[in-house]
Every structure is written in structure tokens, then in C-alpha cells.
Image (tube, grey):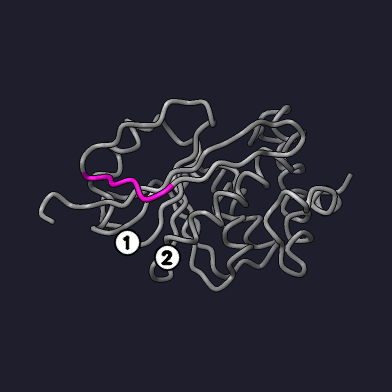
Amino acid sequence: MLLKEQFKSFQWILPVLSAGEAEKYDEYFSVLRSWNERMALVSKKSIDLSFATHFCDSLFISDFGRRFLKGNQVYDLGSGAGFPGLVFAIRNPEIQVRVYEKLSKKQNFLGAVVGQLKLENVEVMGAMPEEKHSGLILARAVMPPPELFRFLLNRMADGAVLVVNIGSQAEEPAPPKNFKKLDEVRYTLPLDCGDRRAIAYQFVSRGT
């Protein structure tokens, strides 16, 4: 079944897609499947369940994160195969999205998707530099939360927002005092792929 047909089948539990959005995801998945045969960007099990575990998960994360965006800049930390950063960019073409990915083979893949889909609002970069980032940072399954918080201490500007996601039954991370919890959302993925939880934290510098 095509990805766009799966979106239609499960539209009753998913965020509403704009005109042509499902076709973009279908094209994205076509590039992912082709590249994955050559360089294993995601696992075989993961590619078979991409509709739910990658695309739908990214939709929920994107819509939740969008609520906290002030300004016009989104960063996807450790983008991997582009989730959720490229999904956010497709869903919000008016917002600038910078995807950070250390591995060159994955950078090449991300560049191929950006070119194929003509995503003019996306910039593909390497590792996230140690400089202050304002706006919204998306971090999906990049590293354990304690490590993630430490990594971002010198990379977030005052007032910037971080969105992380975890399994619904996982213990909630205990962030440093610099990270103030704003809100959370729980959602269920289709195809019996389980429940998830996204949490938003605002960075507050020690001097404020």
C-alpha cells in the first residue's frame, strides 16, 4: 500500500494533512526506500513500519512543537533519515528548518531528499556547533535525555524550546534547573506501533 493510501486509511486518528502533503511523504519514502537498500539508513523492520514509526510519529511531534515556536527557525538535532525535521519542513513550508546530522552518508541522503522534493526551507548541516540557538529544537531518539540536556546547555539561547519524545510508559526525564517543562502530549501510533509521549522544555539561563 502506498504511503498516501495509508494516511487516508488512518486519517481519523492523525493530524489533518494539507493538500498534496501525503504525496510529498510518499515521494520522500520512495527516496528513503531506494537509499536504504544501499546504505541501511534505518533498520529493515523500521522501513517496513515507516508509515507509523517515522512519518506519523514525526507528524505528532511536529504539530506539538509548532505550538511553542516563536520566530522562524527550527533545528532537528541528529536528524538521521530526516525524522522529524523533514516532515516538519514539508508540513510548514514557511518555516526555516536546519537539520543537523554528523554522518556524511546521512547528510548525502538528506540532501537528496531536499533536492528531490524541492524543499527550499531546509538547510542540511553537520554536527550542531556550540553556539546559542534560538527557536525550536527537535530531538527525536538522538541520545538519552540526561546526555541530551548536558549537550544542549551551551547550545540553547534563553527562551529556546526543546521537544523530546519517549515511550508512554518510560520514566519522565529529570532535567537540570535550566530546563523548565512547558507541556506534554501523549499519542498512539497506528499499526499497533505503541504509544508515545512528547515533552516540551524551555531553556532558562541561570542569570534569569
76 or 124: nearer the viewer? 76
- Which three-letter amino acid code belongs to the residue tagged 2? Gln
Q: Position of residue 49 (x, y in %)?
A: 74, 35
The answer to whether the residue labelled 1 contacts the one labelled 2, judged by CB atoms less than 8 Å apart, is yes
Element at badge 1?
A: loop
- Say whether residue 103 is left or right of residue 162: right
Q: Residue at x 49, y 39 (%)?
A: 165
Spot occupied by residue 111 in the image (x, y as percentages of width and height): 59, 56
Which residue is at a point 40% across and 31% down the rendered structure image?
A: 172
How far apart are labels 1 and 2 at the CA level?
A: 7 Å
Q: Position of residue 50 (x, y in %)?
A: 72, 39
Q: Residue furthest left?
A: 207
179 magenta-colored: yes
Q: Which residues are magenta?
A: 178-183
Q: Which mark is residue 87?
A: none
Above-or-below relation of 9 to 16: above
Q: Earlier in the sequence, mark 1 or mark 2?
A: 2
Q: Identify which amino acid the numbered label 1 is placed on.
A: Ser
The residue identified by callout 1 is: 134
Q: Is residue 141 left or right of residue 54?
A: left
Q: In the image, what residue occupies the spot 18% across and 52% down?
A: 205
Circle 2 sits in a helix, a strand or a loop, which is it?
strand
Q: Is residue 40 left or right of residue 154?
A: right
Q: Which mark is residue 73?
A: 2
Residue 2 is left or right of residue 168, and the answer is right
Residue 173 in the magenta stretch? The answer is no
State the image quarter where residue 72 is shown. Answer: bottom left
Name the foreground residue: 138 vs 100: 138
Q: 29 above or below 121?
A: above
Give the answer, above or below, for where 185 lies relative to 141. Answer: below
Secondary structure mostly seen in the magenta stretch:
strand
